[in-house]
Amino acid sequence: MSQTAAQISSPTPGKVWLVGAGPGAADLITVRGQNILSSAEVVLYDDLANADLLNLCPVTCERIYVGKRAGCHSASQREICSELVNKARTGRNVVRLKGGDPMTFGRAGEELQALADAGIACEIVPGVTAAASVAAVAELPLTQRGIASAVVFATGHACADRGATPVNWRAMGALGATLCIYMGTRHFGVIASELIAGGLNPDTPVAVVADATLPTQSVRLGQLSDGDTLTADPARRPALIIVGDVVRWREISAAAPAMAAAE
Ligand code: SAH
C-alpha cells in the first residue's frame, strides 16, 4: 500500500511517562523515576516538582514549563494534554513530571484519557505523596493503634472549584479518621467549622506542614477552633493540613502505656 506524505513524515508515536517527583527534596524521587528522566527526550514540569530533577535529563532533552509561576503564562489542563499528545507524536519519549504522586490530586486522569484517545502508550511511575512526606517529617503516624485506623485524603480546593466534586466535610467530621487535607489552607476556616458541625471537637489537634522535605519547611500545631489563623502564610507555600488525634499521639500514648504493652 502506498503511503501519503503525512504518513511518511509522522513517526511512530513515542511513549509518555507520568512520573511522580516526590514532595520536594530531589532525592525523594523513586529510582525508576530517576532512570526514566535520564533518558527523557521531552519533559513537561510544573512548580511542585523540584527543578534540580531536570539536571537528571540529558542535555538534549526539551524542557517545557507548564506551571503557574508569577509572570509566566499558566498552561491550562487542556493545553498540557494536547502538548503531551503533540510531543509524543513527534516520536519522542516524553516525561510528565508531577509533584508528589501523579495519581493523587495530580490531574492524571485527564492526561491518561487524552493519551488513550490519541492511541499513545503511557506508563505511571508513582511518587511519595505529600501526606506521606508530611507524616514523616512531622513524625505523625497517620494511623496509630487505639487512635486512628483510617486515613482520608481530601482536597480543600473543591470549596472554590465549581467543577470539582464537593467534599462533605460534615460527614468527614464523623469518621474518626485522620484527615489529610491538600490545597486546603485558603479555605480552612470554612472547613474547620464544617468539621466541628459534623461532630469533631473544636479542640481536635491540627498540624499544618508547609514545604515538607525542603529547607523552608515549617510545622505549625494548633486545634480546629483556630481556623484559618493556623493556615495563614504570606509566602503561600504548599501546605498540607492534618486533622486528628494522631497529631498528639505521643501525649496520648504516654498517658496510656498499657495500650502499647498489650501488643
Ligand atoms: N500530587 C501531589 C499533590 C498535588 S496538589 C501529591 O501527591 O503530593 C498540591 C497540594 O499538595 C498542595 O497544595 C499541598 O497541599 C500539597 N503539597 C504538595 N507538596 C507539598 C509539600 N512539600 N509540603 C506540604 N504540602 C505539599
Image: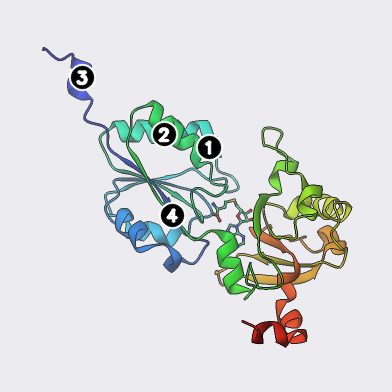
How is the protein colored in the picture?
A: rainbow
What is the distance, in whole Å, between disc 1 and disc 2 at their CAs? 10 Å
Query: Which quarter holds ligand 1?
Result: bottom right
Mark closest to the chain's N terminus, 4 or 2? 2
Mark closest to the chain's N terminus, 1 or 2? 1
Q: Mark 4 points at which residue?
A: 126
What is the distance, in whole Å, between disc 4 and disc 1 at their CAs? 23 Å
Q: Mark 2 points at which residue?
A: 83
Q: Mark 1 points at which residue?
A: 75
CB under 8 Å between discs 4 and 1:
no
Q: Is mark 1 within 8 Å of ligand 1?
A: no
Q: Mark 3 points at which residue?
A: 7
Mark closest to the chain's N terminus, 3 or 2? 3
Q: Mark 1 is on which residue type?
A: Ala
What is the distance, in whole Å, between disc 3 and disc 2 at their CAs? 20 Å
Image coords of residue 176 (percent x, y): 75, 60
